[in-house]
Image (tube, grey):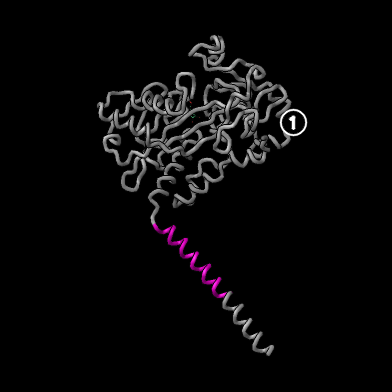
Amino acid sequence: MKLNEKDIKEYYTQKANFDFIKYLFKDNGKNSLNKPIPHRDSRSQRNVNYPNRFKVPDSLVDWSQSFPEYDNNIQNYQFIANDVKDNQLLSLDSLNRWSDNDNPLSIDWSQRITIFNGFEQKVNDVINFDSNGYPKNPAGRTGLIKNGLLGKIGPNQAADPLVIKKVGDDFYFIAIERRDKTGWALPGGMIDKINNSISTTLKNELNQEALNCQNSDIVKKNLDNILNSNGKTIYKGYVDDCRNTDTSWLETTVVMFDVTNYPEICNMKLSAGDDAINVTWLKVDESDSRFNNFYADHKNYVYMGIKSLNEINKPNDEIYFHNESLSISNTLLYASLGFILTGFIFYKIFKT
Ligand code: RP5
């Protein structure tokens, strides 16, 4: 099944995410709406290690828009980071090899997955390819081609844990400051030969980036129990990551762990390690620049998590509104029936 560009665009602009931001916040979303322009970070210079990208105006992100100047110049905007080139020298079966050879024709795309509409699909079923055999970024043009800093051609799968707690009316979650100087983010990581599933990636990344310290055995055991049983998948799909290119991009699975009712987890020691230089319980607060400039689409995932928690503990006002609107429609229905019946009686009386 091939999906057309319009379907893909509709899905990846994640319109629904913005609607619930409006629903959640009193500012009607004006300040919370961190990405009014889809696919913004993927066209940015947020990653300082990236060369300049070819400028792509908002209106020409979509592949369906003709952009001859882009087509004529984009081959001059190639980038493969040295880390990737070095890794490409390792043997393909080495445990430390995470990169593809720079030859898309050597890849069996029916064995690679992309997350589309929240489901895993074969890349060759839903992704379009360019004339050189490279898969085309489903969210559109980025101003750069080849791997950049990413290992895989096409989708690169990651996983992100959202460990969240409610304190009074406020929400806090575990956030890390990324070592690559791109800001604060969820403590996620790539699924690779070592982190070879979503669940091991979630556990390993959380442990390495945020819990790089001694916690008591009881805390570790409780955390393990939560990570093993209490997760809720809140998002699966494309990530607007500043490392994306036209031919390599990130996709993630975000799993939420609500630890509000586990005081020992809420109070456990956090300590940054691995790819993180800082870690904290970050408050969901737009006036905090760490949260306001949160990495990639991660802020949206936090809001999606809160929305899902609010739905579980929803106050009755929505239900009340629903009943009220139901009773209005019932009133209208009964009034119209009454009107038709009266008309019918008059008709019968006057006819006789
Ligand atoms: C993001 O990059 C994903 O959501 C995940 O958080 C992260 C994975 O990359 P590394 O942190 O391993 O660099 O797009």
Asked if residue 102 is positioned above or below residue 139 in the image, the reply reads: above
User: Magenta stretch: residue 334 in it?
Assistant: yes
Q: Which residue is drawn at 62% across and 42% down?
A: 10
Q: Which residue is drawn at 38% across and 50% down?
A: 313
Q: Is residue 29 visible in this depiction of the protein? A: no
Q: Residue 244 at what x, y percent from top left?
A: 57, 27
Packing grade of label 1 (10 A; few <14, some 14-19, many >=20) is few
Q: Is residue 48 visible in this depiction of the protein? A: yes
Indicate the secondary structure of the residue bearing disc 1: helix
Q: Disc 1 marks which residue? A: 68
Q: Residue 144 at what x, y percent from top left?
A: 63, 25
Asked if residue 56 is positioned above or below residue 106 in the image, the reply reads: below
In the rendered image, which quarter is residue 43 located in? top right
Q: Which of 246 and 37 is in front in this view?
A: 246
In the rendered image, which quarter is residue 258 located in? top left
Q: Residue at x 49, y 28 (%)?
A: 158
In the rendered image, which quarter is residue 85 located in? top right
Q: Residue 67 at what x, y percent from top left?
A: 72, 33
Q: Give the range drawn in magenta.
A: 316-336
Q: Which of 344 and 59 is in front in this view?
A: 344
Looking at the image, residue 43 sits to the left or right of residue 296; the answer is right
Q: Main secondary structure of the magenta part?
A: helix
